[in-house]
Amino acid sequence: MLTQTPIRTGSFKQPRAQLARGEPQVLRDLERVCALCGKKRKCEHDLMIHPSHPAWTQYCPNAPTLSALIAERSERVQARRGGLD
């Protein structure tokens, strides 16, 4: 069964393949949690209708992990920018 995890990670400019290379255990955990989630239909609907709306963070059990990945990426980008000045 296909999970929404690759789509959610893709919406944060963290493609599944990149996550698989850099954080394979995290990706497996995201997929496992997604597979067991009871909100798949709501997630699919939200992704289809409003993919960037943050409502999913209220019901997604992967929200804390995905938020941490976003914060990490943001810190890396800012560090690179700071290093260029």
Image: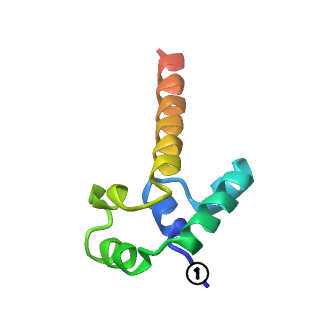
Residue at 35 percent across and 72 percent down: it is 47
Amino acid on which disc 1 is placed = Leu
Q: Position of residue 24 (x, y in %)?
A: 73, 55
Name the one closer to the observer, 84 or 23: 23
Residue furthest bottom as drawn: 1
Image coords of residue 63 (percent x, y): 45, 53
Question: In the image shown, does 53 or 11 lie closer to the viewer?
Answer: 53
User: Which residue is at 54% across, 26% downward?
Assistant: 80
Name the foreground residue: 1 vs 60.
60
User: Which quadrant would the N terminus be assigned to in this image?
Assistant: bottom right
Q: Label 1, secondary structure: give it.
A: loop
Check disc 1: other Cα within 10 Å, few if <14, some if 14-19, many if 20+: few
At horizontal 55% and vertical 68% (from top left) the residue drawn is: 34
Residue 52, image quadrant: bottom left
Residue under pointer 1: 2
Looking at the image, residue 83 lies above or below residue 59: above
Residue 64 placement (x, y as % from top left): 47, 47
